[in-house]
Image (cartoon, grey):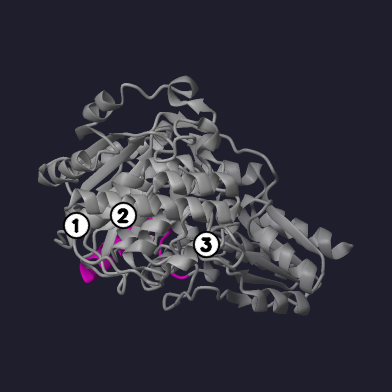
Amino acid sequence: MGERTQESGVRSQKSEEKTNALPSKATRDAYGETLLELGKKRNDIVVLDADLSGSTKTVKFAKAFPERFFNLGVSEQDMVGTAAGLAITGKVPFASTFAIFETGRAWDQIRLVVCYSNTNVKLVATHGGITVGEDGASHQALEDIALMRALPNMTVIVPADAIETASVINVIANFTGPVYVRLGRAKVPQIMPVDYKFEIGRAHVFSQGKDVNIIAAGIMVDTALKASAMLKNEGIDAGVINMSTIKPLDEKAVLNAAKNSRLIITAEEHSIIGGLGGAVCEFLSENYPIPVKRIGIKDTFGCSGSPDELLKLYELTPEAIAETAREGLRK
Amino acid sequence: MTQKTAGKIRDIKTLEGIAKEIRKYILRMLTEAGSGHTGGSLSAADVAVAIYFSKMNFNPDNPKLKERDRFILSKGHAAPLLYSVLAKAGYFDIETLLTLRKIDSSLQGHPCCETVPGVEISTGSLGQGLSVANGIALGLRLDKNPARVFCITGDGEIQEGQIWEAAMTAAHYKLDNICAVVDNNGLQIDGPVEEVMRIAPVHDKWTAFGWNVIEIDGHNMKEILAALDKAEAVKGKPTVIIAHTVKGKGVSFFEGKVEYHGLAPSREELEKALKEIG
């Protein structure tokens, strides 16, 4: 698996006024840096990887604290079990590999010795979603959130950018219990306020829309902000909510969004089945049924291509969200 | 009637007596439950008794004691054995054993660490215990904690690929604070291990994976103690004890019978079995 250094990023930034002055940055890079800082402060932080430390960026921690870093080789199941064992001795293990291998290869291990056993294991996976790019479908996790969300005791977090990632990693290091964090490979715009503090289960509301509210996670938060700006020009008031904690869902934020608008759109770089869209639909259908449109991968596998090309191909663009809003509001 | 068995027992006769008692608990609780795994609980009984009562440091009043030695039952279906040993060791009342598999009981069909004191990790889905044992061993080493980790797997269980991932890890990290035991009873649910999926040569496989390997008669208490002592003395690599055992050991009409892998004794069988054990 070759590391790529292309600077293409996920997409060109057109609405500069919406973002802070920071350059685009991959969430995995923020993870590697934050983990290193945590390692300096705390001896109980240990890190595990399955032969992808260069790509997941745990290599920074590995170089600084070799005695607290455990490479398990290409064996995700063993890595998760080993992490659970370390947690039993009071360590706070961060176990990382690509999202599809972490959640897919080791699902039963995560279920039994992490969630059912309620061990204090932090599963931080990189290379989530379609923007993995050229490696293609085998490496693009489009089902990981669904897999993790179905497990009792699990907290599921999808940070929107590098700023949020740093805050998330610091927060979960102080939280007791199983956590899954999904990060990406590609560089993405930094959109969260610089002084933003993440809280588990609390959404960040960029704006509340009167016509439509877009509930997004991960890289799609930026996409939603761009869609909102496009719609504003047409007189459509579209709010944007960063639902970075998929589980437990910020039900209050979802309810507010539904009560204040006519349409809810969910947007995620994940299958429309079982992820954020699923979570929002499950909640609203039982509590406040209003029309919901799900933007995501439509029950299909991905393919090779650049991140930008793939986002266009699978309709994860501001234009696609805007069109979905227009269509949904016409009905 | 909470029984506390403090201190380490080296007397063979006493340990054999405890093993008899444990076998009787296992049978009683299985009959009361009406389901569960008889054969594999009985086959591993002598080894588990020796580990708990001759080797391990623990305090039932403080199950999370930092200095405790750890025990992982990777073959989680032998839960009746683990529960019996924990009750005998004083973690909970002997009477609780009779609630096995019942609604509202802490004693789930397979061990649950959230409900039973003394259970380090939940097991039941095979092949996972050794990885957890490795993680504990690594954590203990980081803390310079001299405690040791024991892990019992089944022989059918080592058909799971994760066991060999973990075997690599333990050897790679030179985890000499781990002692694994393969309860080599030769049978699995669908028949003889040799016929279902050959695992032989077991000894050579573990040797090839970098382990110190000891083969013993897993029902000979003297051999078990000697093997556990040797395991502790070997430095720089993990030790696995291949314990040759008989499925259903201790009850003649269960011994070597594959159908008793997952079958509980009937009331009549229980009476006969208890008499036979004496």
Q: Which mark is residue B98?
A: 3
Q: Nearer the viewer, mark 3 or mark 2?
A: 2
Pick whichever, A195 or B93, lies toward us: B93
Instruction: Answer with mark 3 or mark 1, whichever residue precedes in sequence.
Output: 1
Q: In the figure, is residue B132 to the left or right of A225?
A: left
Instruction: Answer with mark 2 or mark 1, whichever residue precedes in sequence.
Output: 1
Q: Label 3 to label 2, Cα distance in Å?
A: 18 Å
Please give the residue where the numbered disc 1 appears in the rendered image: B9
Q: What percent of the width, then of the height, locates residue A67?
A: 17, 54
Q: For residue A32: magenta? A: yes
SS category of the residue bearing label 1: loop
Q: Chain of mark 3?
A: B
Q: Residues within 10 Å of mark 2 (few under 14, many from 20)?
A: some
Quadrant housing residue A236: bottom right
Instruction: Answer with mark 3 or mark 2, whichever residue precedes in sequence.
Output: 2
In the rendered image, which quarter contains the N terminus of chain A? top left
